[in-house]
C-alpha cells in the first residue's frame, strides 16, 4: 500500500517515481526562481521585468503545450 502511494500518480503520467521526482522538482525550482524574481521586481521595478512571465510561459509549454498522450498516461517532451 505504501509503495502504491509513491508510484500511482507517477505511473498515471507515464513516469517512474524517479522520473517524476526529477520533473516535479525541476518545475518547483523554476517556480521558486520565478517567484523570487517577481518579489525583486516588486521592490525594484527595473529588475527582472520579464523573468516571472517567461518562467510561466516555459512551464506552461513543458507541462501543457508539448505533452503527448502515451498508452499509459501523459509523457512530457522536454
Image: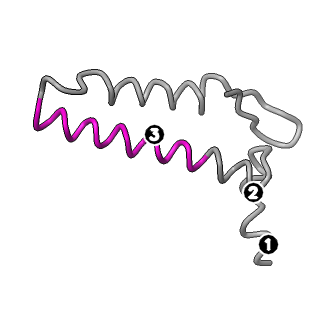
For residue 18, above or below residue 59:
below
Q: Is-magenta flag for residue 43? A: yes
The residue under the point 61% across, 23% down is 65
**Mark closer to the chain start, 3 or 2:** 2
Estimate how packed mark 1 is, as few (under 14), some (14 to 19) or many (20 or more) residues with alpha carbons within 10 Å.
few
Quadrant in the picture for the N terminus: bottom right
Report how far apart the C-alphas of labels 1 and 3 lie in the structure. 28 Å
- The stretch in magenta equals 24-44
Q: Nearer the viewer, residue 23 or 73?
A: 23
Based on the displayed image, in which of its 4 quarters is residue 57 positioned?
Answer: top left
Identify which residue, 2 or 30, lies in the foreground: 30
The picture places residue 7, in percent across and down from the top left corner, at 77, 62
The local secondary structure at tag 3 comes to: helix
Residue 11, position in %: x, y? Answer: 80, 52
The reply, left or right, for residue 15 in relation to residue 54 is right
Q: Relative to 11, is 27 above or below?
A: above
Identify which residue is drawn at 14% across, 36% down: 42
Distance in Å between CA atoms under marks 3 and 2: 20 Å
Q: Which mark is residue 17?
A: 2
Vertical relation: 29 (above or below) 18? above
Residue at 89% from the left image edge and 37% from the top image edge? 71
Report the side of 44 relative to 72 (left or right).
left
Q: Which mark is residue 30?
A: 3
Left/right placement of residue 24 relative to residue 2 reads left
Q: Nearer the viewer, residue 60 or 38?
A: 38
What is the quadrant of the C terminus in the image?
top right
Whichever of callouts 1 and 3 sits on the residue coming sooner in the sequence is 1
| Numbered badge on residue 3 | 1
Report how far apart the C-alphas of labels 2 and 1 lie in the structure: 10 Å
Counting residues from the N terminus, which is met first, the one under dot 2 or under dot 1? Answer: 1
Is the stretch drawn in magenta largely helix, strand or loop? helix
Amino acid at each position: 500500500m505504501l509503495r502504491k502511494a509513491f508510484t500511482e500518480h507517477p505511473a498515471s503520467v507515464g513516469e517512474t517515481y524517479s522520473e517524476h521526482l526529477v520533473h516535479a522538482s525541476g518545475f518547483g525550482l523554476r517556480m521558486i526562481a520565478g517567484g523570487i524574481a517577481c518579489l525583486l521586481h516588486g521592490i525594484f521595478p527595473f529588475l527582472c521585468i520579464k523573468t516571472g512571465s517567461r518562467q510561466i510561459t516555459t512551464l506552461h509549454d513543458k507541462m501543457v503545450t508539448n505533452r503527448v498522450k502515451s498508452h499509459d498516461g501523459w509523457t512530457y517532451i522536454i
